[in-house]
Amino acid sequence: MTKSTRLLLIGPPGAGKGTQAGILAATYAIPAVSTGDIFRSNVKNETELGLRVKAIMAAGEYVPDSVTNAVVENRLGESDTAAGFLLDGYPRTPDQVHELDRMLSAQGTALDVVVLITADTDEVVSRLLKRAVVEGRADDTESVIRHRLALYEEQTAPLIDLYEKRNLVVAVNGLGAVDDVTSRIVAALAAKGILAPAA
Ligand code: AP5
């Protein structure tokens, strides 16, 4: 493994970011930092932050940048991220990219690779409707899923260009078995010189 590994997973809702983040975090021995998980845990525990974001999330809107940036800055200030991390679901807006750049440059670091997980709309809608039955996530109704996808296309997909200009993006097909998607990501990272630590 490189001395430290700073990864970002990007892709539409339902592409498999959270699923892959968990596996990759274990594989590369780095913490996964998921803004969605952090917000959901706050909603569940009815914290001040949770009460603030609950309705926003249920509607499939983005939490305001100032709130999200503060959450991430706080998390990346924790010692377990010093040797690397995997961001899942952040940044999603130009302001968040700017703020992440600022946070990392203040530490003298930067992202190493941006993994774009691709999946077509029919597949992600079908996955999220299945998850609705199993997990009952408030934002997994069909109308909210479609809104989340539209918001992704409008606000987050344009960030891929920006990271492509920095030569950081590897695109990985998110269709097929979870293990196959993981293998594709691991191969794409290896091609960028990022290897899992020896077991
Ligand atoms: P977040 O939790 O990040 O939701 P999302 O981006 O909509 O992504 P999902 O969790 O729905 O999908 P995923 O790509 O992680 O796929 P997953 O692995 O779960 O954000 C939720 C909300 O929080 C946002 O809408 C917003 O309100 C707020 N928020 C978060 N970050 C924010 C930010 N930066 N700025 C502002 N607001 C923010 O998989 C989906 C399903 O598919 C699962 O059931 C899974 O088991 C299944 N699956 C996964 N892989 C496969 C496969 N290969 N084959 C079949 N099924 C699969």
Image (cartoon, rainbow, N blue to C red):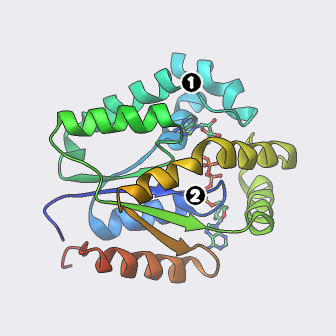
Q: Which mark is residue 64?
A: 1
Specify the quadrant of the image occupied by residue 170.
bottom left
Specify the quadrant of the image occupied by residue 61.
top right
Name which residue type carries label 2: Gly
Q: Is residue 140 visible?
A: no
Quadrant where the image shows the C terminus: bottom left
For the residue pair 190 and 81, the one nearer the viewer reads as: 190
**Disc 2 within 8 angstroms of ligand 1 (CB):** yes
Name which residue type carries label 1: Pro
Residue at image mark 2: 11
Residue sitting farthest toward the right: 143
Q: Position of residue 69 (x, y in %)?
A: 42, 29
Query: Viewed as shown, does residue 30 lie left or right of 158?
Result: left
Q: Position of residue 164 (x, y in %)?
A: 43, 59
For the residue pair 187 and 157, the one nearer the viewer reads as: 157
Q: Position of residue 53 (x, y in %)?
A: 61, 24
Instruction: Mark 1 and mark 2 in contact? Answer it, CB < 8 Å.
Output: no
